[in-house]
Amino acid sequence: MSLLRVESLCCTFPNGTRAVQDFDLDLNEGDLVGLIGPDGAGKTTTFRMLMGLKNPTGGRIERAVAPEDTAYVPQTFALSPDLTVEENMQLQARLYAMKSPRARITELLASLELDPFRDRLAGALSGGMKQKLSLCVGLLPHPRLLLLDEPTTGVDPVSRREFWELLHQVHDEGVAILFSTPYMDEAEYAHRMLLMHSGRLLDQGTLESFREKLPGLVLKVTTAHRRQVQEEMKTFNPLDLFGEGEIIRARFPDQPVEPLLAKVSALPGVESALHSEATLEDFFLHSLVQAEEGIHA
C-alpha cells in the first residue's frame, strides 16, 4: 500500500534558486528508502515539503497516511536542552495528546538504552544519545511512517552502528522509513536508493540494479602520487576516472583483467592495483558526470 506519493515536486526560493526540481517518490508500507546526496543537494528542503513545513512551488504530494501516523526527526537536534530526557518525552507525549504515556516512555528509553540517563539534561547528552532521544520522541505515537533527515551526521562510528541496529528493529516492526544521508556506506542499508544532486534526482534503484547499469571493469589503485598516476591512467582510455586522497577508482571497458592490472601496477608511484566490485559511490559519480554532460550538451 502506498503511504506517500510525490510527482514532479519543485521548490524555487524567492531569489530564484531551484532547491528541488522534478522530484518523484512512491513510498509504500514496509519500505526502507534512502535519499542520498551531498550537502546542498536539496534533501532537507525535500523533507520539509514532505512534512508540510514548506509549500512546494510545483508538483503534487499525495498522503495516504495521517499526519499523526507520520514522525519526523530533523537533522538538527530540536528538543529542549534545558529539560531532562524524561521531561522531554513527557512534554512530547502531551503534545501528541497521549493518554497514560509512562509505559510507552519507559519501553522506548529501555529499548534505546537511555533509561540510565532519564534524569540528565538533554543538552548534556552526547551526539549519539541526542539522536537516540530524537528517535524516541518520533516513535512515541507508534508512527507508520518515519522520516529521518541525516540522522547520524556528526555521530561517532560506534553510535552510528548502534543507531542503525535500532532503526532496523523499528523497520522490522512494520514502520516504513525514509532517511537521507551523505554517507555512501550508510546508504547501502536502504532497500531502495534515490541519488540526488543539485536539487535533481540522478537515478533510483538498488545497489544491484546500479551495478547492472555500470558495466565494465573497475580498478582500485593506491598511490601517494595520485595526480601523476591519474594522468598516466588516462592514456589507457578509462570510461570513468575518479581520485580522492591516495585512492583512484577507474572503470574500463570489459577486457582481460590481468594484463590491465599489470599495466597499471607498472606505472611509477603505484603501490597497489586491485580488481574491485563497483560501489554505490562509483555509480553516483558516474551518474553525476552523465548529468553534467547532459546539461552542457
Image: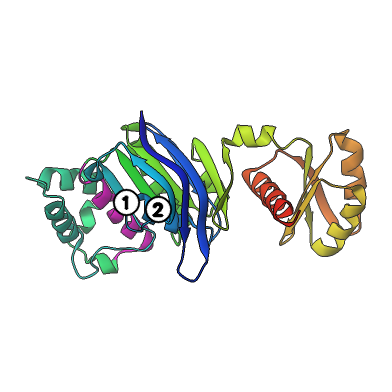
Q: Which mark is residue 72?
A: 1
Image vertical order of residue 86 relative to residue 283, above or below: below
Residue 17 location, x and y as percent?
52, 66
Q: Residue at x 67, y 47 (%)?
A: 287
Judge from the rendering whether residue 273 lies leftward or rightward of residue 144; answer left or right: right
List the residue tagged with mark 2.
Answer: 47
Q: How far apart, in angstroms, are the residues tagged by discs 1 and 2?
A: 9 Å
Q: Residue 269: where, in percent of width, then height? A: 87, 59
Which percent across, then down, holds residue 12? 48, 61
Q: Nearer the viewer, residue 241 or 223?
A: 241
Q: Residue at x 24, y 52 (%)?
A: 137
Q: Over which residues does the magenta segment extend?
A: 125-141
Instruction: Please say if the residues under marks 1 and 2 sit with CB atoms less than 8 Å apart.
Output: yes
The amino acid marked with disc number 1 is Tyr
Task: Identify the secondary structure beneath mark 1.
Answer: strand
**Badge 1 local density, few (<14 within 10 Å), some, or many (20+)?**
many
